[in-house]
Amino acid sequence: MTDLRWYLPLEQCRSLDAIRRQWHPLLEQAASLPGQDPVRHHDALLAFIGMSALSPHLKLAAILACVDSRDFDLRLALGALDDQVRASRAPWPGSVQDAVAGNGPAMQVASRRDWLGAFVVGRLAGLRDGLAQAGTGVAPWKGEFRKRYAEMAQRRGLADAGLPARPLGAAPRLTRIK
C-alpha cells in the first residue's frame, strides 16, 4: 500500500515546478515507473488522481506535464478532474484564447517556466478538443475513471477507497479488506 501513497511528499508543493522535480524520483522509489511495472504505475497514477489532497488544477497539470500518454490514458485524469477545473473559470492565455476558448476554461497553475505552462495548456486544449471532435465529451471518462479506480482498489485490497461517495481530492480512508 505504501507505493499507492508515493505522492504524499508532493502535497507540500504549491507549483508545478516543485512537483516536476520530485515526480520521477518518488515513482522510482515506489517501484512504480512504467518501465518497472506498468500495472503499479497505472495504479499509482489512479491513486494520485483520486486520493491526493492537491488542488484539482495541480493534479491535472502534474499528470499532463509528467505522464507520457503511451503509459497512461490522460483522458482518465481529465474525466476525474475536469468538473472542478471548469468551476474555476480560469481564462486561457491571450495567444490561444480564440482557438480554444470553446473547449472550456484553462487551469490555474503556477510555473516559472513559460514553456511548461504552454505545454500543459496545449495538452489540456488538445484533450478537450479531441473529445469534442469525437462527439463524446468528458462524461464517459468520468465513469471510466471511477470504474478503473474501483478496480484498482479491489485489486489492491482496499476497502472503502472512498471515491464514489466523496468528492475527488478529499482524503479517503484506506483500510485493508480482511
Image: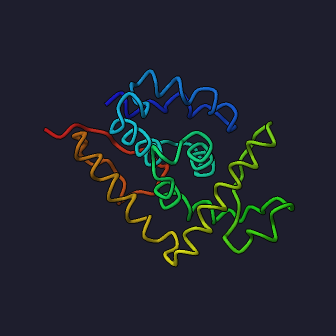
Q: Nearer the viewer, residue 36 or 105?
A: 36
Question: Looking at the image, which residue is at 58% across and 75% down?
Answer: 133
Taking the view exactly as shown, the residue that stands out farthest to the right is: 94
Percent position of residue 64, x then y: 59, 47
Left or right: residue 165 compared with residue 57: left
Name above or below for residue 167 compared with residue 105: above
Say how the picture is coloured: rainbow
Compare residues 38 and 151 and report the one nearer the observer.
38
Decide if residue 139 is on the left or right side of residue 57: left
Q: Quadrant of the C terminus?
A: top left
Q: Is residue 160 left or right of residue 86?
A: left
Residue 129 occupies quadrant: bottom right
Give the residue at the far bottom of this rendering. Answer: 135
**Residue placed at 49% from the left, 42% from the top?**
52
169 relative to 131, above or below = above
Q: Residue furthest left?
A: 178
Question: What residue is shown at x 58% (from left), y 61% (from top)?
Answer: 84
Q: Residue 45's quadrant in the figure? A: top left
- Give the mark count: 0
Comparing 113 with 165, the one in front is 113
Report whether 158 appears left or right of 44. Answer: left
Which quarter of the figure is the N terminus placed in? top left
Percent position of residue 22, x then y: 58, 26
| Residue ID at (40%, 57%) | 166
- The percent position of residue 13, horizontal first and vertical second, equals 64, 33
Q: Is 129 or 107 nearer to us in this picture?
A: 129
Residue 114 appears at what percent x and percent y? Answer: 81, 42
Above or below 123: residue 129: below
